[in-house]
Image (cartoon, rainbow, N blue to C red):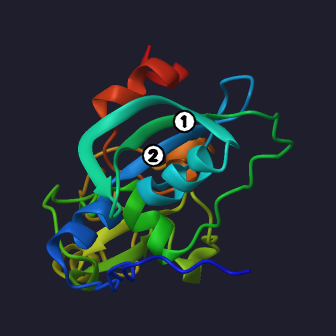
Amino acid sequence: MISHPSEPRQQFPIDSKHPLYTLMAQLKTLKLDASYRPIEVIDALEALVLCWMDKALMLECHTEKAYSPNESFYLPAVIVLKRLVKFTYNNMQCNRHNVLWRDHNTCQYCGDIFDDKELTLDHIIPKSRGGLNTWTNIVAACKDCNQRKGDKTPQEVNMKLVRAPKKPISNVLNRCKMRTVEEIWKNYLWEFK
């Protein structure tokens, strides 16, 4: 015999425009494997589900909570999986998005910060002179600086780079394009100790 509850449960529709939903979607969680090695950054709601399914343990939490009709849950800031994860670091591709991310949207000639659409990619050694599409030869440049440099090297037009370009280190934060590191994560990230 199937039993029915006396009152139907109230359903809460997921509204992506609701401020609470927006806040929870912005919160991120550092995910560690069973050896406490950082493996990725995920949404806090996804981390909460992993904890609820008993696939992970919450080590640190945000001050914000998620609510169900009957309970409230702190959203995880750091979780550790109950298993080891086998993975290899993928090399980051040298493309526009990643170069702008590496250079923090800063023109590498004048040092000013711009929106993505206001920046160009500049070949330090111009392509016409055999310059390659590599991490060490491409930098973010504003349109004015790129035009001023033209088809010359920075030395020929007396322009200095803000910093020498290099290939980013492939770690969990780089792979996730994280520009800021949450204070609570620093105990679990070796590069910040």
Q: CA distance from mark 2 to mark 1?
A: 7 Å
Count of numbered labels shown in the rendering: 2
Residue 3 in picture, x, y percent from top left? 61, 77
67 to 188, vertically: above or below = below
Name the quadrant containing residue 172.
top right
Quarter of the image where the C terminus is located? top left
Quarter of the image where the N terminus is located? bottom right
Tell me the residue at 55%/74% (across/down): 95
Dot 2 crowding, Cα within 10 Å, few <14, some 14–19, many 20+: many
Q: Tag on residue 79? A: 1
Residue 126 in picture, x, y percent from top left? 50, 75
Amino acid type at image mark 1: Ile
Q: Nearer the viewer, residue 142 or 103?
A: 103
Residue 24 in picture, x, y percent from top left? 30, 61
Name the quadrant containing residue 157.
bottom left
Could you say whether the residue bearing mark 1 is in a helix, strand or loop? strand
Q: Tag on residue 64? A: none
| Identity of the residue furthest to the right in this view | 86
Q: Nearer the viewer, residue 88 or 30?
A: 30
Query: Between disc 2 and disc 1, whose residue precedes?
Result: 2
Q: Are marks 2 and 1 in contact (CB under 8 Å)?
A: yes
Could you say whether the residue bearing mark 2 is in a helix, strand or loop? strand
Residue 132 in picture, x, y percent from top left? 64, 70
Is residue 78 visible in the rendered structure shown here? yes
Tell me the residue at 21%/85% (across/down): 17
Q: Nearer the viewer, residue 60 or 175?
A: 60
- Which residue is tagged 2? 29
Tell me the residue at 56%/55% (across/down): 49
Amino acid type at image mark 2: Thr
141 vs 47, left or right, is: left
96 to 134, vertically: above or below = below
